[in-house]
Amino acid sequence: PDMARDLGWSLEWVFGGLSAALLAGGFAAPWFGRLIDRYGAGRMMSAGSLLAAAALAACAAAPNGTIFVAALIALELASNLVQYGAAFALLVQLRPHVAARSITYLTLIGGFASTVFWPITTALHRQLTWQEIYLVFAALNLVVCLPLHWRLSGDLARSRADGAVKSTPVPGRLPPERRQFGFVLMVSGFALQSLVGAAILVHMVPLLSGLGLGASAALVGTLFGPAQVTSRLINMGFGRNLSPVTLAVVAATLMPAGVAVLAWSAPSVAGAMAFAVLFGLGNGLLSIVSGTLPLHLFGSEGYGRLQGKVNSVRLVVSATAPFALAFGMIRIGVVPSLLAAVTAGALAVLAFLAIRRA
């Protein structure tokens, strides 16, 4: 609301600017993936820290909405170089044979990001303007992230100089003649899951209100984050023998199952709580699968480029999904829109099952 007031825009226009930035980041993701393969993930993450800091500072200093959106687009471009996709590529480039386990640990830690930073941001906003908060976040990128990424870029350079990485690539499990078909199935599955995830999470409160559960929205929301982390803990402790394909099937099943429970049980508070837990469990596993499944199917060679393509589809779908669900809730109603989301999730399950057969 403060951004909308200072920029002289409506809230819808502010969110529209964010969607435009997400789309730009999605379209640029494959190009950044190629740069990560070519120059190394550590160097690109270091550059991404600088770009993120500059973009955050530009957002804070923007005199009008047009420049703010331009800076926001630069920020989303930088996200391709500092978030999960680049970090997964760094782990694969550093130690490809243990990268799948490292990705699981990373997503476990990353699962606390919103749990930590939402209340921190809220607390800061009681004392600072949103522009000042952006400058604080810019400083974090420079003071904390940049030195760490630069250190990791040195580790990667030494590993490549020793020949330890290039001599032992991880092979992919898909036969060469099935790789194109497998890639289409994998991207389709991830796209459908991103469609369901982005649409439901953005519209969580209006969805629950439309189903007569508005007063319970806060309670339901508190269950989602812990469920994400719990799923990663369970997978770390008991899922070591599960292949990434099986884990993808499980994740893809849990998310539409949770939405189906919500649609069937509303306005039951217990049903809404079960939805939050199931959806959170599935979404938590999805973060792991998005890193481990491409490595499992296609190997470590060209992993950065592959992650770029996957992230491209995910970001583009995530930018458009909330509009699609909002349109559906207005035109056909809340429950039919939820059933459409269940159908999309079920198609994701079929895509991953088809990969398993291949």
Image: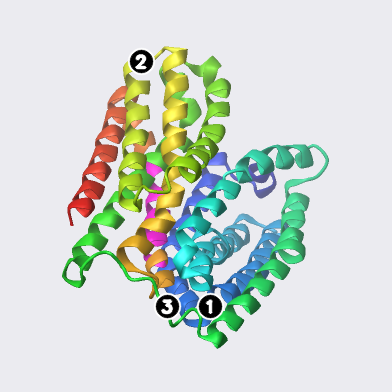
Question: What mark, if any, has residue 40 been given in the picture?
Answer: 1
How far apart are the alpha carbons under marks 3 and 2? Answer: 52 Å
Range of the magenta residues? 308-323
Q: Residue at x 70, y 37 (%)?
A: 119
The residue under label 2 is 265
Q: Please, what secondary structure does the residue beneath circle 3 have?
A: loop
How far apart are the alpha carbons under marks 1 and 2? Answer: 49 Å
Q: Alpha-carbon neighbours of circle 3 within 10 Å: few (<14), some, or many (≥20)? A: few
Q: Nearer the viewer, residue 194 or 104?
A: 104
Q: Amino acid at mark 3?
A: Thr
Residue lying furthest top = 268
Residue 219 x/y as whole percent: 57, 21
Q: Amino acid at mark 2?
A: Ser
Q: Is residue 50 left or right of residue 136?
A: left
Q: Amino acid at mark 1?
A: Gly
Q: Please, what secondary structure does the residue beneath circle 1 have?
A: loop
Q: Quadrant of the C terminus?
A: bottom left
Q: Alpha-carbon neighbours of circle 1 within 10 Å: few (<14), some, or many (≥20)? A: many
Q: Please, what secondary structure does the residue beneath circle 2 have?
A: helix
Q: Which mark sits nearer the N-terminus, 1 or 3?
A: 1
Q: Alpha-carbon neighbours of circle 2 within 10 Å: few (<14), some, or many (≥20)? A: some
The residue under label 3 is 168
Q: Quadrant of the N terminus?
A: top right
Q: Is residue 258 left or right of residue 276?
A: left
Per the picture, the main secondary structure of the magenta-coloured stretch is helix
Residue 143 x/y as whole percent: 77, 64
